[in-house]
Image: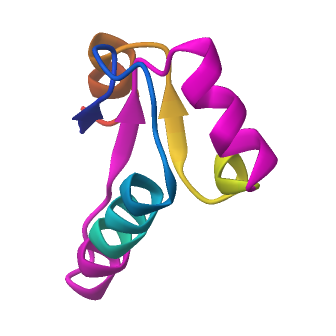
Amino acid sequence: IVDLKEVSYMDSSGVATLIEGLQMCQKYNGKLLIAGLRDNVREVFELTRLDKIFQIYQDVDEALAQHA
């Protein structure tokens, strides 16, 4: 679970890092979950359609509850 609640800005290098992490997790049959997106960072995910690729949760507790 990557908690982004403290992230107020994300550019293409941040997006690329998350995509690389997702690919690595999938390679080893793992999951990469995103939690705590602020509105402006969520907008980046929506504009790039990454909200369709990543599993996104309101917070870490919700992500844990869904994948316990």
Classify the position of the C terminus by image quarter: top left
Location of the N terminus by quadrant is top left
Which residue does the image show at 27% across and 77% down from the upper left? 29
Nearest the eye: 68 or 27: 27
Q: Which residues are magenta?
A: 23-48
- Residue 23 image point, x, y percent: 36, 79
Q: Nearer the viewer, residue 44 or 32?
A: 44
Q: Residue at x 33, y 26 (%)?
A: 4
- Does residue 1 sit above or below 14 in this rendering? above
Q: Position of residue 30 (x, y in %)?
A: 25, 67
Q: Position of residue 46 (x, y in %)?
A: 75, 41
- Occupied quadrant, residue 39: top right
Image point (32%, 54%), residue name: 32
Query: Within the magenta stretch, is there residue 2?
Result: no
**Please, is residue 14 above or below residue 61 in the view?**
below
* Colouring rule applied to residues: rainbow
- Side of 38 relative to 28 (left or right): right
Q: Which residue lies most toward the bottom here? A: 27
Say left or right for 4 vs 43: left
Whether 29 is among the magenta residues is yes
Give the quadrant of residue 63: top left
Residue occupying the point 62% across, 28% down: 42
